[in-house]
Image (cartoon, rainbow, N blue to C red):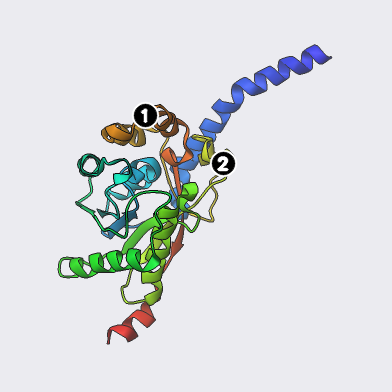
Amino acid sequence: MWQTFLEILKIAILIAPFVSYIKAIWNKYTLHLFQRTFQKHNILYVIAHPDDEAMFFAPSIVELRKSNNLYLLCLSTGNADGLGKIREKELQASAAYFGFMACYIVDDSQLQDGKEREWSVEAVARQVEEHLVRLQGEMEINIIVTFDPKGISGHPNHIAVHQGVAAVFNEEKYPFDVFCLTTLSIFRKYSAWGEIYNCGYEHQHYLALTPYHSYRAMMIHHSQFVWYRKLFSIFSSYAYCNSFDLYTHNAEKYKQKAK
């Protein structure tokens, strides 16, 4: 009896990854039927450091670039280890690989890379708002994509970026919506394509069946592509799945303030 049970258990363990991957494929090609689609939008990704776009946002970038114009705003040069100039060039190359229309990199003394560096909400909001004002003569940003309140990895710079974007959004001076990338638990964060299996209808999802684009973009960030980031690019759920909370601006309040 125990021998039979162990044989069944072995088979179940062997086929489980294949079953989950088949379910992932199903979700990849059916979830979009039940969620909002975005076309001909100007979408601004706001990140904290060079390589954030590759580590966390690749699936949504690859999907949204098909029908929209994407722009990238990075609020630091990533100079924590004195590699700021190198990392700026790497980010520009990564942005070109992903197809961003333009990549803007901020070098502000109040927004320097580092977990011990505290970024004020006011400094982040100022940079975001200045960028929106600069672009107004050329275009109107319809959506800002950024971190959620937990910052994905808990990095204080990521959290500050969310808070700064939220501050500008809550002023209701600019008619943009916000996508906040959902922070996952540790187990789900490193479940690779398994996270696609967990996708439901409560979030806006963008999915990839392989980590190719995330890994390829991280290769461009050569100065940062150490062994544990290589593993991260393969096993991180964010290489396969971006799930967002969507916050929509109040069009009526914006119209009243614009008068």
Q: Residue at x 32, y 72 (%)?
A: 175
Task: Work out whether 152 lies above or below 240.
Answer: below
Where, by quadrant of the figure, is residue 234 drawn?
top left
Q: Residue at x 49, y 59 (%)?
A: 149
Q: Residue at x 44, y 33 (%)?
A: 232
User: Which of the pair 4/165 is nearer the observer?
Assistant: 165
Disc 2 residue type (three-letter): Ile
Instruction: Name the residue tied to disc 1.
Output: 226
Q: Is residue 210 visible?
A: no
Left or right: 222 as drawn, with respect to 239 = left
Instruction: Compare marks 2 and 1 and give the one earlier in the sequence.
Output: 2
Q: Is residue 42 visible?
A: yes
Task: Work out whether 226 lies above or below 208.
Answer: above
Left or right: 23 as drawn, with respect to 55 = right
Disc 1 residue type (three-letter): Val
Q: Which mark is residue 179?
A: none
Callout 1 secondary element: loop
Pick out the residue farthest to the top: 3
Crowd band around label 1 with a 10 angstrom C-alpha radius: few (<14), some (14–19), many (20+): few
Instruction: Name the residue tied to disc 2.
Output: 186
Q: Residue at x 28, y 69 (%)?
A: 129
Left or right: 195 as drawn, with respect to 130 = right
User: Which of the pair 55/137 is nearer the observer?
Assistant: 55
Question: Which image quarter holds the C terminus?
Answer: bottom left
